[in-house]
Image (cartoon, coloured by chain):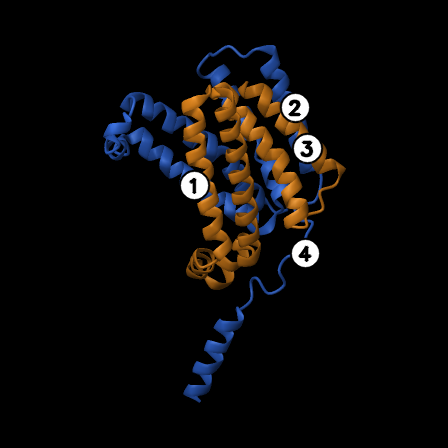
């Protein structure tokens, strides 16, 4: 695991809860969207908090897919679940919400789970050997064009 | 009947999320290490390989199904039940599915991690 890969995992961890929080905050400003006025969802996107939330969730998708390209699913999911803890800590220390002892216990369990999986290897299946090489059809096309030129 | 609808929707959410996660993970393994690809071949090849991968497209459809099931579940049951139950089931389901379909070596360490995180999420969101 390189520093760059840890940064990608940190991005997955941070962007999802940050995006969800901004979407939630923005939608509270927008108000309820009635089922017979679904077009008002479009105007909700113009709310800066909703727009920022969507942007962060897009970043989450990109970072998550990047992580899945070099790590197991059973590594990425628990390793990035610290996002749940992050939201609880923001709720406690920034928003001054009360966290019950049961929730603190939940935070401890997640932290233990992350510790368990982070100590092991990120990838247990052999990477696709030609995944970063030229795919067959591309190689054929390149070969054909080279042959045509010569 | 309300509970039946809620729990049916929770099962559909977890199923859709697991199928989506597994398909996306398989697609990205087929695409290759994105970091290496970006350095060696540029961003266009990453976009082209990802968008043209059938597993990626099916994964997105499964994720969309899970999202709409979430909306349905939230119209029947409370968020405090729907969110932790679906998230916990997804964690456990992913461990089984990754072992069976992606052939990942889910050893004792990873099983413990999946169970701890699933239990932690259930307590945190409950």
Q: Which residue is denoted by mark 2 in the rendering?
A: A109
Q: Which residue is painted at 30% across and 22% down in the image? A: A32
Q: CA distance from mark 1 to mark 3?
A: 27 Å
Label 1 vs label 4: CA separation? 30 Å
How far across and how far down the image is residue A77, in percent? 59, 38
Pointer 3 chain = B
Numbered disc 4: secondary structure: loop
Q: Quadrant of the C terminus of chain B?
A: top right
Query: Pointer 1: what residue?
Result: B64
Residue A101 in the image: x percent, y percent? 61, 11
Q: Earlier in the sequence, mark 1 or mark 3?
A: 1
- Indicate the colour of chain A: blue
- Name the secondary structure under disc 2: helix
Crowd tier of the residue under label 2, counting other residues whose Cα lies within 10 Å: few below 14, some 14–19, many 20 or above: many
Q: Nearer the viewer, mark 1 or mark 3?
A: 1
CA neighbours of label 1 inside 10 A, class few (<14), some (14 to 19), many (20+): some
């Amino acid at each position: 695991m390189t520093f760059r890969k840890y940064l990608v995992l940190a991005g997955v961890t941070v962007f999802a809860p940050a995006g969800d929080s901004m979407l939630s905050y923005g939608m509270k400003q927008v108000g309820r969207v009635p089922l017979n006025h679904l077009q008002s969802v479009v105007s909700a996107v113009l709310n800066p908090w909703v727009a920022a939330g969507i942007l962060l969730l897009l970043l989450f998708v990109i970072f998550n897919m990047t992580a899945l390209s070099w790590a197991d699913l059973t590594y990425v999911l628990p390793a990035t679940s610290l996002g749940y803890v992050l939201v609880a800590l923001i709720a406690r220390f920034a928003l001054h919400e009360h966290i019950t002892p049961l929730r603190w216990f939940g935070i401890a369990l997640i932290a233990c789970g992350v510790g368990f999986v982070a100590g092991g290897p990120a990838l247990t299946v052999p990477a696709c050997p030609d995944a970063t090489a030229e795919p067959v059809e591309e190689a054929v096309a390149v070969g054909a064009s080279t042959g045509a030129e010569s | 009947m309300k509970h039946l609808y809620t729990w049916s929707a929770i099962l559909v959410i977890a199923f859709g999320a697991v199928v989506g996660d597994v398909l996306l993970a398989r697609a990205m393994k087929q695409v290759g290490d994105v970091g290496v690809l970006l350095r060696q071949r540029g961003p266009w090849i990453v976009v082209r390989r990802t968008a043209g991968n059938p597993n990626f497209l099916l994964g997105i459809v499964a994720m969309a199904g899970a999202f709409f099931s979430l909306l349905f579940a939230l119209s029947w049951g409370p968020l405090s039940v729907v969110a932790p139950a679906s998230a916990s089931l997804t964690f456990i389901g992913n461990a089984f599915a990754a072992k069976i379909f992606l052939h990942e070596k889910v050893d004792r360490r990873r099983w413990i991690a999946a169970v701890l995180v699933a239990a932690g999420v259930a307590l945190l969101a409950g």
